[in-house]
Amino acid sequence: MYGHALYQQWYETDAVKEFDEVDLAINDYEKLVGKLKAHRAVKNLEESKILCIGEPNEFFKGGLAARAAVDKFRPGIDYMSFETFQEKLEEKSLESEEIVKVKNQFLENAETVSDEIDEETSLKSARVYVVLKELIGERGYDGITINCLSGILDLVDTTPCLAFQRLRDEGTPAVCEADIPQLVTTILLRYIADRPTFINDPVIVPDENRVIVAHCTAPTRMSGFDEEAERYDVSLHHETKLGLAPSVEFKEGQEITLAGVSHSFDEMTATSGRITRNTDYHVCISQAEIEVEDAQFLFNNFKGFHWVLVYGNWMEELKKAVDLLGMELVFPEES
């Protein structure tokens, strides 16, 4: 700021306290860009139009969390019953050219395909993507979530794992199990990082400063929508054995951000970390071990249920976004 060098200390200390809605970046382009990313992420959250298939999951505070999200952040949430979704699926022939093409692409791009997989299972999984993609195009949805580990399995006889991988790779937040709180985390990190995110079940190992993250679907464009895709194998969904699911090989040594918001949206716990290895436990099939600064802190301050992982260290941007939303970011202080 030409002519204001003598006032820099005032700007950086007193002014930002007096005018708390003003951001300040002096001679720091990266800091400026980071703040703009945070503002953009919040704007996209507030303007999002979401489709929730089935009721919001009661395990994650269900309708209470959904209403709190709308009240606090103003996204629009449309609901569709399992029965209506089933009807839309059944309107599509499994032999349609588009469904066959999606199925073939998913299998041909994989490193390996499990012997357990048959043609009908593959086509049913691909059909979920085709129907969801049409709904997004027709109604302008910015995000999707399905209460997938529930009664919908008895109706549609498949899971959305294939569909969610592809939607995330294309830039659409797609969140498992109708977890509305972590849909908020997903949208924020997707737009802060300009990358798809991986919602997961985190297992914290406090005495070793490790976190194991796992779920049965993950994006492959983890480094960016236009970057080279990660390798993946194709298996069946771990718990149900109903739908096709990708086992994604994450980039070892990659710095990451991991976060989860409370069901009341008052606090979010987050940390940076680094992927040390891809694991092979008898759990959900996309999985990795993360080295973190203070796993005991994460264990003591656990928020939500699922957490969300994205490549890159986006802690500063996330702090700003959470502050703009009137929440508190809880994180371990780095040594």
Image: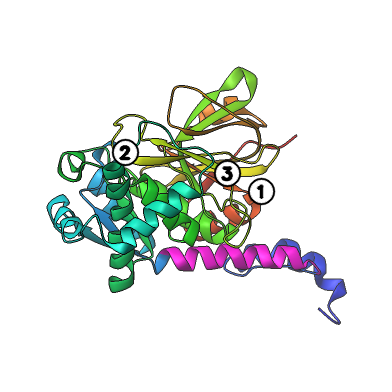
On the rendered structure, is 264 left or right of 200? left
**Residue under pointer 2:** 118
Discs 1/3, front: 3
Task: Relative to 21, say whether 331 is above or below.
Answer: above
Q: Main secondary structure of the magenta part?
A: helix
**Residue under pointer 1:** 313
Q: What amino acid does circle 2 point to?
A: Asp
Along the line of sight, the residue nearer the viewer: 292 or 119: 119
Discs 3/2, front: 2
- Distance in Å between CA atoms under marks 1 and 3: 22 Å
Along the line of sight, the residue nearer the viewer: 125 or 202: 125
Counting other residues with Cα less than 10 Å from the Cα at mark 1, is it few (<14), some (14-19), or many (20 or more)? some
* Magenta segment boundaries in residue numbering: 27-45
Q: Position of residue 115 (x, y in %)?
A: 40, 31
| Cβ atoms at labels 3 and 2 below 8 Å apart | no
Along the line of sight, the residue nearer the viewer: 82 or 315: 82
Quadrant where the image shows the N terminus: bottom right
**Residue under pointer 3:** 231
Residue 37 shown in magenta: yes
Q: What amino acid does circle 3 point to?
A: Arg
On the rendered structure, is 75 left or right of 165? left
